[in-house]
Image: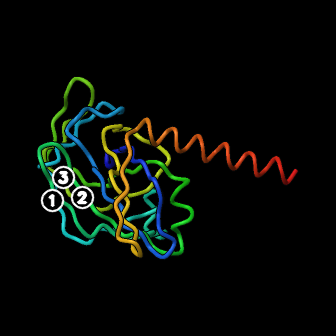
């Protein structure tokens, strides 16, 4: 396995550029049965932020990352021309090359690995990894909500958009 998946939550992105902060991976067993040890990450910044692991489709860069026993905290800058589309993507995936790993009952434990990129993708595996804040480039504000608040906000926005569509029809 050369990549692991994790879930993020995006609240908003400033149209002129945004900074997202979150957790790229945690030491929990992901849905593929693997464990990616955060403290085993080897990387140098900046890392590319890609759309679906496509090196030809960069959407920004990871400019800050810190490995802790609980996970890898990261900050990434989103490119202006893709900021509108980011709200449609709700997950993130780490692309990596295994350096040292061992089989476990459910899959593999990756003890050392080279972190190559972070990607926005629609397929999650590690639901504990999450974007915890979005910092507007213009307003320098940090927004955070609980998962329940995020779901309620998303459902309200969806209802608003459906209402607008109904009006147009």
Residue drawn at the location 51% of the way across and 60% of the way down: 86
Q: Secondary structure at mark 1?
A: strand
Marks 1 and 2, the one that precedes in the sequence? 1
Labels 3 and 1: the sequence-earlier one: 1
Query: Looking at this view, is 55 or 151 the one in front?
Result: 151
SS state under label 2:
strand
Question: Where is residue 80 drawn, in percent x and y?
Answer: 49, 75
| Image location (x, y in percent) of residue 102 | 15, 36
Disc 3: CA contacts within 10 A as few (<14), some (14-19) or many (>=20): many
Q: Residue farthest to the top?
A: 105
Residue on which the image places disc 1: 42
Residue 130 bears which disc, if any? none
Are circles 3 and 1 on residues that touch, CB within 8 Å? yes
Crowding near the residue tagged with mark 2, few <14, some 14–19, many ≥20 C-alpha atoms within 10 Å: some
| Disc number placed over residue 115 in the picture, else none | 2
- Residue 146 position by quadrant: top left
State the colouring used for the structure image.
rainbow
Which residue in the structure is indicated by mark 3?
A: 113
CA gap between label 2 and label 3 equals 6 Å
Q: Is residue 35 left or right of residue 125?
A: left
Report whether 21 appears left or right of 158.
left
Is there CB contact under 8 Å for labels 1 and 2? yes
- Give the side of residue 56 with respect to residue 21, left or right: right
- Asked whether the beta carbons under mark 2 and mark 3 sit within 8 Å of each other, the answer is yes
**Which x, y percent locates residue 43?**
18, 63
């Amino acid at each position: 396995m050369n990549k692991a998946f994790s879930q993020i939550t995006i609240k908003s992105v400033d149209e002129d550029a945004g900074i997202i902060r979150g957790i790229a991976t945690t030491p929990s067993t992901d849905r593929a049965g693997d464990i990616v040890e955060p403290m085993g990450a080897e990387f140098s910044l900046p890392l590319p932020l890609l759309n679906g692991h496509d090196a030809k489709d960069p959407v920004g860069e990871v400019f800050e990352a810190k490995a802790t026993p609980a996970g890898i905290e990261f900050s990434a800058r989103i490119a202006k021309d893709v900021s509108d589309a980011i709200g449609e993507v709700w997950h993130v995936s780490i692309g990596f090359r295994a350096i040292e790993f061992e089989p476990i009952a459910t899959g593999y434990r990756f003890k050392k690995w080279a972190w190559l990129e972070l990607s926005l993708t629609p397929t999650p595996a590690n639901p504990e990894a999450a974007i915890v804040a979005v910092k507007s480039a213009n307003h320098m504000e940090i927004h955070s909500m609980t998962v329940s608040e995020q779901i309620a906000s998303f459902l309200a926005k969806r209802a608003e958009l459906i209402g607008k569509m109904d009006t147009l029809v």
